[in-house]
Amino acid sequence: MSDTDSDVYDVVVVGGGIVGCAIARALAGTNLSVLLLEARDDVGDGTSKANTALLHTGFDATPGTLESRLVARGYDLLGDYAEQTGIPVERTGALLVAWTDEERDALPGLKDKAERNGYRHCEIVTAHEVYRRVPDLGAGALAGLTVPGESIICTWTTNLALATDAVQRGARLLRGARVTGVVANGHNTLQTTRGDVHGRWVINAAGLGADYLDAEFGHHRFTVTPRRGELLVFDKLTRPMVPLIVLAVPSSRGKGVLVSPTIYGNVMVGPTSENLEDRTATGTSEEGFDFLLSKGRALMPSLFDDEITATYAGLRAAIDRDDYLIDVDPQARYVLVGGIRSTGLTSGMAIAEYLMGLLADAGLDVTERADLPAPPRMPNIGEAGVRPYQDADRIASDPEYGRIVCFCERVTAGEIRDAFQSSIPPADLDGLRRRTRVMNGRCQGFYCGANTRTLLDARGEVR
C-alpha cells in the first residue's frame, strides 16, 4: 500500500455491485473523498452480474413500501441515464399470461396493485390478444395483463457505467479487497485482504455479505439467505418467437418462471428460486434444469425444439423481511443498505439518491459539485444498436473494429483493446466477457477462448 492509502476517506462504500457503484457515483459528485471497496477482482462480479436483466416499472411491488417507491423512481433515473451513457435498453413491454381460472381472476387485482404503485398503463386483454402478441405461446392461455413499460437492459453495462462514472468523478476503486474486520478508533478502520483502509463514514452495500459487515458494527438484525436463481439461455435464432417479456401470474403455486428476450439477442427462461446456505453456490443443478424444462415447455413448447446455448445461476441476497433495509447510524457513522434483492438493478440510482438525503439529515455535506465531468459513453454490446463490426466508418478509421475475434458474438479486436484501455479494465476473462460479450455465444469460448486468454495475459491482471 502507498502512503496515500493510509489517508482517512470521508466515505468508504463497501460493495461494487450496482447499488454500491450507484452510491459511490453519487457521493463522488460532491466534495467528499470516496473509496469504493470490492471483495472480488471486478465490479459487478457478484449478485449484479446474473439476474433477469429487467428494467422494472415496479407495477408488482408491494404498495407503500420503500422498495415500491425506489423502484418507480429508479425506473425513470436509470432510463434517463441509459440514454446519456449508451447502456443498451429495449422497450419491449411485458405480458402476464393467465393459464388457470385462478390466475385469470387475479388479473383485476394485479391491475389495481399496479395503479396503487402509481403505474396506470396496464390493460387486461383476451386470450385472442395474448396469442396475437405472442403467437408461439403454448395452448391454453385464458387472458393476459399488459405492462407496456417493462424493458430489458444490460445489467453488465449498467454496473460498469456507474463504476466508471464514480471513478471519473474522483472516487478511488480498490478491487480484491474483502473486509475481514472493523475497528473504531476515532474513525472506522476496515481491515481488508489488501490492507487497512480508513473512513469517517462507511456505507454497507455488500450484498450477500451485508449481514457479516453489519455484525462488525455491533448489529444482529437480519440474516442474508442466498437464494439461487437458475436460467436457461436459448440460441439467437429463437428471438423472433419472444417479442416481449412473458411473465407468469402469481398464484397459490408461486410466481412461476418468465420467458424473456435478452439485450444480446437471445431468449432466457427462468429463474428458479431456491434458498441455500452456501453463499458461493453459483453452479447450476440437475433439479433446476428439470424444473425449467417442465415449466418452460408448458409456456412455449416450440421454444424447446431449439438449442440451449448456456445455463447459469445467480444468488440473490434475500432477508427475512419484505422490504429494503436501509438504516443510518449517525453515532457510528455507518449506513446499512441491505435486502435489496433483484430489484436493485432498477432502483440502484434511486437508492443512492435516497441515501444522499439521509446523509444530509445526518449532517454530512453532500452538495453536488459544479464541475462534474460528463457521464461516460459506454461501448454498445446490445443487438438493438449498431455494433462496431457493422459500422463501416468506424472500421475505415480503425481496421481493428473490423477484425472479428469472437465469431459467435461478433466481438472485434478493437473492442477488446478498448476494454483493456478503459478506466476500469478487466482483471480476468469473465470481466472481459461482461465488457465485450467475447466467449458469450454458442460455442462458449471453444473457438475464441485461447486467443482471448492470450490477449488477457499479454496485458497482465489489472487491478
Image (spheres, rainbow, N blue to C red):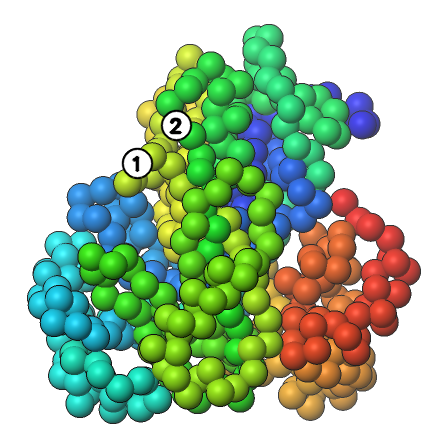
Q: Residues within 10 Å of mark 2 (few under 14, many from 20)?
A: some
Residue projecting furthest to the right: 458
At a point 43% along the width and 65% down the height, the residue shown is 291
Question: In the figure, 24 relative to 378: above or below?
Answer: above
Given residues 463 and 212, the one toward you in this image is 212
The residue identified by callout 1 is: 321
Kind of residue indicated by mark 2:
Phe
Counting labels gives 2
Question: Mark 2 near mark 1, Cβ–Cβ under 8 Å?
Answer: yes
Query: Image quadrant for the N terminus?
Result: top right
Quarter location, residue 191: top right
Question: In the figure, 116 relative to 404: above or below?
Answer: above
Residue projecting furthest to the top: 185
At a point 62% along the width and 20% down the height, the residue shown is 181
Residue 323 placed where, x, y %? Answer: 29, 40
Residue 50 placed where, x, y %? Answer: 53, 57
Residue 432 placed where, x, y %? Answer: 71, 62
Along the polypeptide, which appears first: circle 2 or circle 1? Answer: 2
Question: In the figure, 101 relative to 200: above or below?
Answer: below
Given residues 332 and 46, the one toward you in this image is 46
Query: Image quadrant for the C terminus?
Result: top right
At a point 33% along the width and 39% down the height, the residue shown is 324
Quarter location, residue 120: bottom left
Residue 322 placed where, x, y %? Answer: 28, 40
Question: In the figure, 236 relative to 368: above or below?
Answer: below
At a point 16% along the width and 80% down the height, the residue shown is 142
Kind of residue indicated by mark 1:
Arg
Q: Is residue 234 visible?
A: yes
Given residues 239 and 395, the one toward you in this image is 239
Q: CA distance from mark 2 to mark 1?
A: 9 Å
